[in-house]
Image (spheres, rainbow, N blue to C red):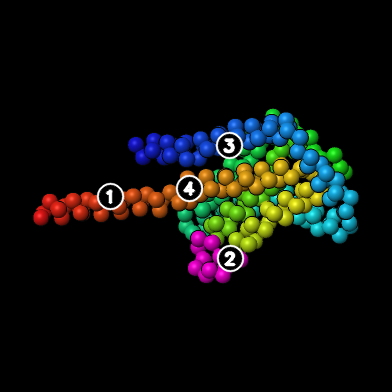
Amino acid sequence: MAKVDHIKHYASALLLPLVLMVAVTYGAGRLVLAVPTGEAALNRDLAADRTGLWNTLTDYGTSLSDTPYIVALTALAAIIFRLVYKRWRESIFLIAAVWGQSLVFLATTTLVGRHRPPVEHLDPAPPTSSFPSGHVSAAVGFYCAMALILSIHVRSRALQVVIWVLGVAAPLIVGFSRLYRGMHFLTDVAWGLLLGVFCVVVAARAILYRREERRTRLRVAGDASSARARLGEN
């Protein structure tokens, strides 16, 4: 019975929201294609102002969420969390957040089929479309999930602020770098941010905070039972 409850929980709390996000992302992508946005002007302006220094800086910026790095860092962090915290919850949450956004991205990007900006591309173009930005959603999925895990386990408010500043800064750096290097339109980056945040929140609710919610329900139920018992005695 417990195993069935687990399956139902993850199906409703994790799988169903991701499936719905696939549909919403596809719909948003088709809408972006149908409505003139004029975003190419921003890409042209950024391309016209390129310098050697910013070319180098944004090369490092975009590499923060290159697929091989994200895969390796996720695996390494998952192993470390398992060893340090003596449980799988943080590790599974991180994997779910990172791979959740990846699955939504892979399920929609080719179907949307948006061309990349009409400027020189400073990076090799992968065989996926421009919408949404997989680099940006992966950056949110990994760095913000890491920030959430770490901030839960530290007591210092100042350290929590530092952790979240770094966790939020990384996706923003990746997003700007992808724009600057001509790999995405602004809406691609914006939806990548939204997709990443969505997957982190869904994974956190389904995995990271599930035990605390269950304990709260049990405590409330226990308090209610005690209150009824006291009323019965009276």
Mark 2: secondary structure: helix
Tell me: residue 56, above or below residue 111: below
- Distance of mark 1 from mark 3, alpha carbons? 34 Å
- Distance of mark 1 from mark 2, alpha carbons? 35 Å
What label sits on residue 21 in the rendered view? 3
Mark 4: secondary structure: helix
Q: Which residue is denoted by mark 1 in the rendering?
A: 221
Give the camera-side residue of 190 and 177.
190
Are the two marked residues, 1 and 3, in contact with CB atoms closer than 8 angstroms? Answer: no
Are the two marked residues, 1 and 4, in contact with CB atoms closer than 8 angstroms? Answer: no
Q: Which residue is denoted by mark 2 in the rendering?
A: 161
Mark 3: secondary structure: helix
Q: Earlier in the sequence, mark 1 or mark 4?
A: 4
x 56%, y 70%: residue: 158
Magenta stretch, overall SS: helix
Are the two marked residues, 2 and 4, in contact with CB atoms closer than 8 angstroms? Answer: no
Three-letter code for the amino acid on which mark 2 is drawn: Val
* Residue 31 point in image, percent of width and height: 68, 32
- Distance of mark 2 from mark 3, alpha carbons? 30 Å
Are the two marked residues, 2 and 3, in contact with CB atoms closer than 8 angstroms? Answer: no
Q: Earlier in the sequence, mark 4 or mark 3?
A: 3
Three-letter code for the amino acid on which mark 1 is drawn: Ala
Asked if residue 160 is among those painted magenta in the image, a careful observer would answer yes
Give the camera-side residue of 128 and 161.
161
What label sits on residue 165 in the rendered view? none
Q: Which residue is denoted by mark 4 in the rendering?
A: 205
